[in-house]
Image: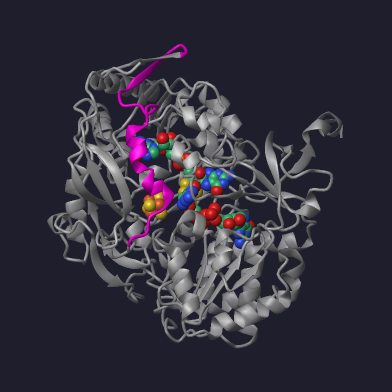
Amino acid sequence: MTASTHPSPPAPDGVHYRACNLCEAICGLKITVQGGRVTDVRGDPDDPLSRGHICPKGTALPDLHADPDRLKTPMRRVGDRWEPMEWDAALDYVAAQLRAVREQHGADAVATFQGNPSVHNSGTLLSAGAFLKALGSRSRYTATSIDQLPHHFAGAEMFGHPLLLPIPDVDRTDFFLMMGANPLASNGSIMTAPGIRDRLKAIRARGGRVVLLDPRRTESAEYATDFHHIRPGTDALFLLALLNEVFASGLERTAHLGGVMTGLDSLKAAAAPFTPEAVEARTGVSAGVTRELARAFAGAPRAAAYGRIGLSIQEFGGLCQWLVNALNAVTGHLDTVGGAMFPAPAFDLLAGAKAGATHHGRHHTRVRGLPEFDGELPNVALAEEILTPGDGQIRALITVAGNPVLSVPDGAALDRALSGLDFMVSIDPYLNETTRHAHVILPPAFGLEVPHYDVIFHHFAVRNTARYSQPVFPIRPDQRFDYQIFDGLVQRLSGRALATPEQRLGAGLAHGRSGLTLDDLKASPHGVDLGPLQPCLPGRLLTATGELHLAPAPMLADLPRLRATLDQTPEPLVLIGRRQLRSNNSWMHNTPRLMRGPDRCTVQLNPADAQGLEHGQTILIRSRVGEITAPLEITDTVMPGVACLPHGFGHARSGTRLSTAAQHAGASLNDLTDPTRIDALTGNAAVNGTPITVHATEQVGESAAD
Ligand SMILES: Nc1nc2c(c(=O)[nH]1)N[C@H]1C(S)=C(S)[C@@H](COP(=O)(O)OP(=O)(O)OC[C@H]3O[C@@H](n4cnc5c(=O)[nH]c(N)nc54)[C@H](O)[C@@H]3O)O[C@H]1N2
Ligand SMILES: Nc1nc2c(c(=O)[nH]1)N[C@H]1C(S)=C(S)[C@@H](COP(=O)(O)OP(=O)(O)OC[C@H]3O[C@@H](n4cnc5c(=O)[nH]c(N)nc54)[C@H](O)[C@@H]3O)O[C@H]1N2
Ligand code: SF4
Ligand SMILES: [Mo]
């Protein structure tokens, strides 16, 4: 089945240092190679950011290199068989197919889906823009709209740029208010803070408070001083109640940014109806707790509020991220030491950015009229845009480092949609639930084989550092990097050649203010420390007026939608997701060392919701969209009315080549989530809070009748 006759070349013996690019923590690694093979991976104690931290996924990096299921040469599907291709022939074929669809049906008929690892790979990240330009299609989808789109939306509206996201200065704060994040499992997100456990412990050791609100008492709760259950999707109400109490008690502190902040009066008016008492029945957080937290947060000299994916992939994601920023701003905790601050990365994507340039709603999806944001369309619309006939229907798809069949709502519908495309190509090292639909798979060299500089996550890091990584393994002459695949396609589509990632990095560093060059970074294999975060406002603001908008008009206009929920009867049982330390979204389940131990794809229910069901039994979970089965775990870590299931499983689909993952198949959470549930303000998917019912599997026949 593989075309190659070349063996994989061995790595040079010795100790290699590089950063892990699997998640946002960018841990420095110390990798020992003996006899051409990796014999040891541990954290690099000399990395100024990660200081020796590593997680089990970092240890598993060499497994990806050695995985026998991994594809290394292009593959073309012929019926239900896969045949190897030479690179030039594969690229010629793909370019010709894309051109044919474009000529027949227009540029927008060719869609792209870029998944999560494409932002963790400087090769894809620095080349994708040119590729998208060569395609000229507006049908652009990424994982952003099932993730952090509300953060970008709030950043653009309040500070003038989607990448202006305030990051909690955890190493200097004394009051860390954390909502909808579980950094002990995720290793931190929009908060690059490797070794977060020690950083949280340090807050407590210096007498500070770590406050966590989540519908599930998570691993992170063990490191909190205060934990409160909160009902899914009600955080915006809680945040407004905090603001209400801050204003009612006269605790606002706006002197620091007073000159540039606009909209304070509108924000006060917006918060006025949402007293702690008015929202407590809905949020599940008592008015007393809310008042105490508001006062303590506002009164703390160094405090930072932070809300992550639990506040984004819900129906009020845009409001939540706005209100987190607003709370920091009006309590004097924005752009101050120990508060929420803006990093200054060496490669600064904001350098030279034009003020007021972010756009929203310039065009819309064809079927449902959902708005683009910054050139991207909401991925909840992808399946319907493929399935609905008519002018502008998507006929061809390019996936890059994404597995949307498992990662977007109603994955089963997308699964069906993909099988009907005229042409699909996947740039991906695995034959998985999504790429099995491709006509051609172009597998890149990746992981320990690629050079790396983290272009994105230094923008979100709790300390300014920079690190360039050399590859550990050389690649075979018949392998290609992601950027070479893009380059090959761009040359064939537009006749232009791409700059290499090294050239782009060099130019990017020259644009930034650190003074560092790529050669400096190459000479510093442990990374370079650029120091703690520094206040930078108003200079870094990029709004058209140069002001910081506390009460952007789109946010105010969305408030009635939130207020209406106070009069609605809550759903009796809703589903939320769960991340696990040894998973990485939908992939890395093919690594035996990460899959050891008991079944992880379990559904958790509070005892109050598990009447008549038994711990360990397989139950049926049903939503408007679909049904799955999963083993039941009865636990009071989840609050009553909430069920919890990890995402990224569901590896039983046929036609994949994932031998280990298939043995731990589990079910896909996104076979239950509903693409019609969105954050209407931003278009982000609202996968958390999906209404469900649960049934004993032997009762399925009966309950199906009601
Ligand atoms: N219900 C629910 N759904 C969710 C979430 C949730 O919390 N709940 N989380 C969402 C979030 S935050 C995200 S980011 C998405 C993630 O979902 P996706 O963006 O679809 O990403 P992954 O599932 O991680 O799939 C990664 C793919 O990239 C491939 N890959 C890995 N490394 C490379 C590389 O270097 N180059 C290339 N070309 N390919 C590579 C892998 O083989 C795999 O096919 O899922 C989202 N879906
Ligand atoms: N090990 C591991 N690490 C990862 C990933 C992975 O799959 N595995 N994925 C990476 C990616 S792509 C991302 S985006 C980040 C995400 O990083 P985090 O945001 O830290 O991710 P989660 O662990 O999903 O934490 C979200 C928390 O929100 C809670 N929650 C759900 N709904 C609500 C709600 O309505 N309100 C509140 N207050 N909380 C709610 C959930 O119970 C959960 O504890 O993690 C990254 N790191
Ligand atoms: S925490 Fe993230 S960056 Fe660090 S070793 Fe684990 S996967 Fe890699
Ligand atoms: Mo994500």
The image quadrant that residue 10 belongs to is: top left
List x then y, in percent, for residue 661: 50, 32
List x then y, in percent, for residue 203: 47, 76
Total labels: the figure holds 0
Q: Residue at x 30, y 46 (%)?
A: 40
Indicate left or right for 41 with 620 as reference.
Answer: left
- Is 97 in front, or is 222? 222
- Is 425 in front, or is 284? 284
Q: Residue at x 26, y 35 (%)?
A: 481
Whether residue 680 is visible, yes or no, is yes
Colouring used for the render: one colour
List x then y, in percent, for residue 675: 61, 41
Q: Is residue 339 above or below residue 502?
A: below
- Is 128 in front, or is 623? 623
Q: Residue at x 51, y 40 (%)?
A: 596
Q: Is residue 77 magenta?
A: yes
Q: Residue at x 44, y 37 (%)?
A: 591
Q: Is residue 323 magenta?
A: no
Magenta range is 52-80
Work out which residue is located at the far top of the displayed protein and give it.
Answer: 79
